[in-house]
Amino acid sequence: MTDMPATAETVTTMTSPKSKITAKNVEVFYGDTHAIKDVDVEIEDRNVTAFIGPSGCGKSTFLRCLNRMNDTIDICRVEGRIEIDGEDIYDKKVDPVQLRAKVGMVFQKPNPFPKSIYDNIAYGPRIHGLARSKRDLDDIVEKSLRRGAIWDEVKDRLQEPGTGLSGGQQQRLCIARAIATEPEVLLMDEPCSALDPIATDQVENLIDELRQDYSVVIVTHSMQQAARVSQKTAFFHLGNLVEYGETDQIFTNPQDPRTESYISGRIG
Ligand SMILES: Nc1ncnc2c1ncn2[C@@H]1O[C@H](COP(=O)(O)OP(=O)(O)OP(=O)(O)O)[C@@H](O)[C@H]1O
C-alpha cells in the first residue's frame, strides 16, 4: 500500500502553532485567600485563548500573572513557574516594565491617557526608546493605529484628546497603544464589557486579525464571545483550571461535569 498524500487536514494538524507561554504549578494567594490552585497550562502563539468561568474563579488573577501585574498588589503572592519563549518571567533579572511592553494589556474599561491621540500611542515607544526620530515615531503611531483598526477614524484629529473618542474608539486606541511597543502577547481583561454591540463586533474582528501576529489571551464573561473569537478555551472554577482545550470541543463536548454545568448555565 502506498503512503497517503498529505491532505490539507493532515498538514494543519502537523503544523499546529507552537507554545508561547508555559505555566507550571502556579499558585496565587491574596493574604489567606488561595485564588489560583496549581495551574498548569500551555498557551499557543498566534492564537486566541479565552479564559472563562464564574465570577471570582480567578480568571483575571491568572491573566495578571502573565505580565506580573499582580506584583503591584501588596498582599498578592505568586508561586510556581511561568515561562514565555522558555524564559522565566519571574526571574530576578527580568524588569517588569520591559516585560509589560512585551506582554501588553488591555483592560475592561477603556483607559486612554489624558493626552492627545498621537501621544497616547507615542508614549510607550518614547519611554522604551523605539523611535530614533520624529519620523520614526510618526510611522509607529500610524502603523499602530492602522493595526488597531482605528486609523481612518482618527487620522485627521491626531492632536485631539484620546478621551474625546467614543467608548469603542477608545478601546481600539488602547489596543493600538498596547501594540505600539511591539508586544508578542496581548492580554485582554473583558475588553468589550463596556462596549455596545457594534463596538464589540469591531473589537472582536480586530482580535481575530491580531492573532496573525500575536498570542492573544482574553478573559470574558460571554461564552458566545469566547466561542466567536478563540481557538482555545480554559475553564476556571474556584481557582482551579478545570478544563482546557479546543474551543469547539469545550463548548460541544466538555469532558468535566463542572464545565458542562457552566456552559449550560447551571453554575455561574
Ligand atoms: N486585589 C485583591 N485583593 C484581595 N483578593 C482579591 C484581589 N483580587 C482578586 N481577589 C480574590 O481572588 C479571587 C479571584 O478573583 P479574580 O478577580 O481573579 O476572579 P475573576 O474570575 O476574574 O472574577 P470576575 O469574573 O468577577 O472578574 C476572588 O476570591 C477575589 O475576591
Image (cartoon, rainbow, N blue to C red):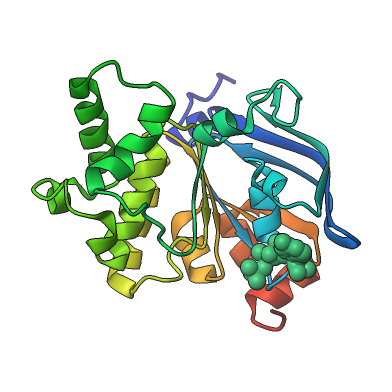
Q: Is residue 45 visible?
A: yes
Q: Can residue 202 be seen in this view?
A: no
Q: Compare residues 203 and 166 and report the one nearer the observer.
A: 166
Query: Residue 151's x, y, as percent?
Result: 18, 46
Q: Residue at 65% of width from left, 49% of height from top?
A: 64
Q: Compare residues 103 and 46 and report the one nearer the observer.
A: 103
Q: Residue at 71% of width from left, 72% of height from top?
A: 260
Image quarter where ligand 1 lies? bottom right
Query: Residue 27's x, y, as percent?
Result: 84, 48
**Residue furthest to the left:** 156
Q: Is residue 243 above or below residue 127?
A: below
Quadrant assignment, res 194 = bottom left
Quadrant assignment, res 243 = bottom right
Q: Compare residues 173 and 264 and report the one nearer the observer.
A: 173
Could you tell me which quadrant the N terminus lies in? top right
Could you tell me which quadrant the C terminus lies in? bottom right
In the rendered structure, the answer to whether residue 207 lies left or right of residue 85 reads: left
Query: Residue 73's x, y, as percent?
Result: 72, 52
Q: Compare residues 152 and 133 and report the one nearer the observer.
A: 133
In the rendered structure, the answer to whether residue 94 lies left or right of residue 149 reads: right
Q: Residue at 64% of width from left, 73% of height from top?
A: 263
**Residue furthest to the right:** 32
Q: In this view, does 111 lie above or below 22?
A: below
Query: Residue 117's x, y, as percent?
Result: 24, 48
**Residue furthest to the front:** 114
